Amino acid sequence: MLFDRDGTLIRDVPYNGDPRLVEPMPGATEALGRLRRADVPVAVVTNQSGVAKGLVTPDEMDQVNARVEELLGPFDAWAICVHDDGDGCTCRKPAPGLVIRAAAVLDVSPRDCVVVGDIGRDMAAARAAGARGILVPTMVTRPEEIDEAPEVADDLTDVVERVLNDVREAPVPAAAAPWARAMGWSRW
Ligand SMILES: [Mg+2]
Ligand SMILES: [Zn+2]
C-alpha cells in the first residue's frame, strides 16, 4: 500500500523542513499498525517540490521523513520526487514514476498496489501506473477531485477496512483453503 505523505499520513504543512511540526493524520498510526500486522507492505510516494524551489534542503527533508518514521513506524520504501512542475521529470505526481519505483522496491506489480492520497494528482499517478487509487479528502481537496476519484474513503481507518476486507473476501483456492484457514486467513 502506497501513501502520499502530506495531507494523507501527516498534516500538510506546506514546504515544511521542521521535524517538530510533523503531526500524524487521525487514524494513521492505527491504520499502519493493522496493515503491518496483516503483512501488507507500506510505502510513501511523495512530491517534495520544496527541494527544487530551495525552500527545503535535502537534509531538512530527511529529518522530517525520519520524524515521520519515528511517529508512524518504518516504511518498506520511500519514493520521493524532489523536482518541480517545469523540470520535466517522470516521477512528480500525476506522473506514474513514484508508484512504479515504490512497487519495484516492494517487488510487486503496480497493478497490485493501492495508492492513497488527498488530491487528484495522487489518483492520476495511481491510474497512470495501473494501480488502485483511494482518495481521502481533506479541506484542500477540490470538489471536482472528489467527483473524479475512482474511490473515496472517509479516513485512513476506512481505507484499511476496504483493503483488508477485499483481501479477506478474495477467493481462497480450494487446495490451499485448509492451509489458509490454519494460518488464520479470516483473523483480520
Ligand atoms: Mg498530499
Ligand atoms: Zn521528479
Image (cartoon, grey):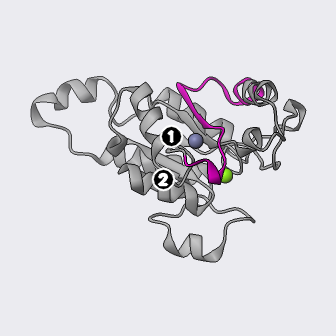
Compared to residue 143, the image places residue 71 above or below, namely above
Dot 1 beta carbon under 8 Å from ligand 2: yes
Decide which of 138, 181 is in the foreground and name it.
138
Find out whether residue 96 is within the magenta segment.
Answer: no
Contact, mark 1 vs mark 2 (Cβ under 8 Å): yes
Q: Quadrant of residue 176?
A: top left
Residue at 81% over, 39% down: 54
Please state which amino acid type lies under the numbered disc 2: Ala
**Image quadrant of ligand 2?**
top right
Q: Quadrant of residue 81?
A: top right
Q: Which mark is residue 5?
A: none
Residue at 69% over, 26% down: 69
Decide which of 159, 149 is in the foreground and name it.
149
Q: Percent x, y for residue 152?
A: 53, 64
User: Mark 1, residues whose alpha carbon is within 10 Å: few (<14), some, or many (≥20)?
Assistant: many
Give how far apart the Cα atoms at labels 1 and 2 are. Answer: 8 Å
Compared to residue 134, the image places residue 150 above or below, namely below
Q: Percent x, y for residue 72?
A: 69, 30
Residue at 75% over, 65% down: 139
Q: How many marks?
A: 2
Q: Does residue 188 appear in the picture of this structure?
A: no
Please state which amino acid type lies under the numbered disc 1: Leu
Secondary structure beneath dot 2 equals: helix
Q: Does residue 91 appear in the picture of this structure?
A: yes
Compared to residue 159, the image places residue 149 above or below, namely below
Decide which of 169, 163 is in the foreground and name it.
163
**Residue at the disc numbered 2:** 125
**Residue at the disc numbered 1:** 98
User: Mark 2, residues whose alpha carbon is within 10 Å: few (<14), some, or many (≥20)?
Assistant: many
Magenta residues span 67-88
Compared to residue 145, the image places residue 52 above or below, namely above
